[in-house]
Amino acid sequence: MKTNHKQKKTHPKKSQKRRLIWGLFGSWSIAGLAIGAALGYVFYATIGCRIEACSFISNPFITVAWGALLVFVVFEVFRIISIDDVG
């Protein structure tokens, strides 16, 4: 006898997806992105180059993105260090 077992594809529920996202990117990571973006814009507004010769600091989008990325990485390093200290 053949049994035909068709299994439904199970997709994670929204709450499981949220837990996965928060597990990868915790509140400190999101805070790091926001703080970095704000600091990147402050850097652009105060120090930024007004001519097109300096491509990094003359574009506010690039400066905000780099600021967010740098502070995110720093926050992630501190988060990993704190996890290692606990465990």
Image (tube, rainbow, N blue to C red):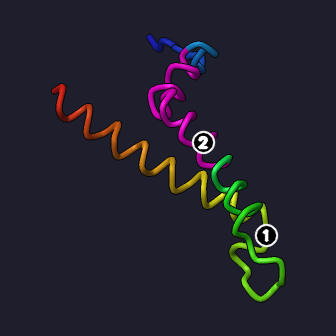
Numbered circles on residues, count: 2
- Up the image or down, 32 lies above or below 71; here it is above
Q: Which amino acid does label 2 sit on?
A: Ile
Q: Position of residue 36 (x, y in %)?
A: 59, 48
Quarter containing the C terminus:
top left
Residue at far bottom of view: 53
Q: Position of residue 45 (x, y in %)?
A: 77, 61
Viewer-closest of 7 and 36: 36
Residue 19: say if magenta.
yes
What span is in magenta? 16-37
- Up the image or down, 40 lies above or below 27; here it is below
Q: Residue at x 51, y 56 (%)?
A: 70
Viewer-closest of 83 and 51: 51
- Up the image or down, 72 lies above or below 19; here it is below
Q: Which residue is drawn at 59% across and 13% down?
A: 15
Q: In this view, does 77 lie to the left or right of 38?
A: left
Q: In this view, does 63 lie to the left or right of 59?
A: left
Helix, strand or loop at label 2? It is helix
Crowding at dot 1, Cα within 10 Å, few <14 / some 14-19 / many 20+, comes out as some
Magenta: main secondary structure: helix
Residue 85: say if magenta.
no
Q: In which quarter of the image is residue 59?
A: bottom right
Residue marked by disc 1? 59
- Mark 1 and mark 2: Cα distance apart in space: 18 Å
Residue at far right of view: 51
Quarter containing the N terminus:
top left
Q: Which residue is drawn at 26% across and 33% down?
A: 82
Viewer-closest of 13 and 35: 35
Crowding at dot 2, Cα within 10 Å, few <14 / some 14-19 / many 20+, comes out as some
Residue marked by disc 2? 35
Helix, strand or loop at label 1? It is loop
Q: What residue type is labelled 1?
A: Asn
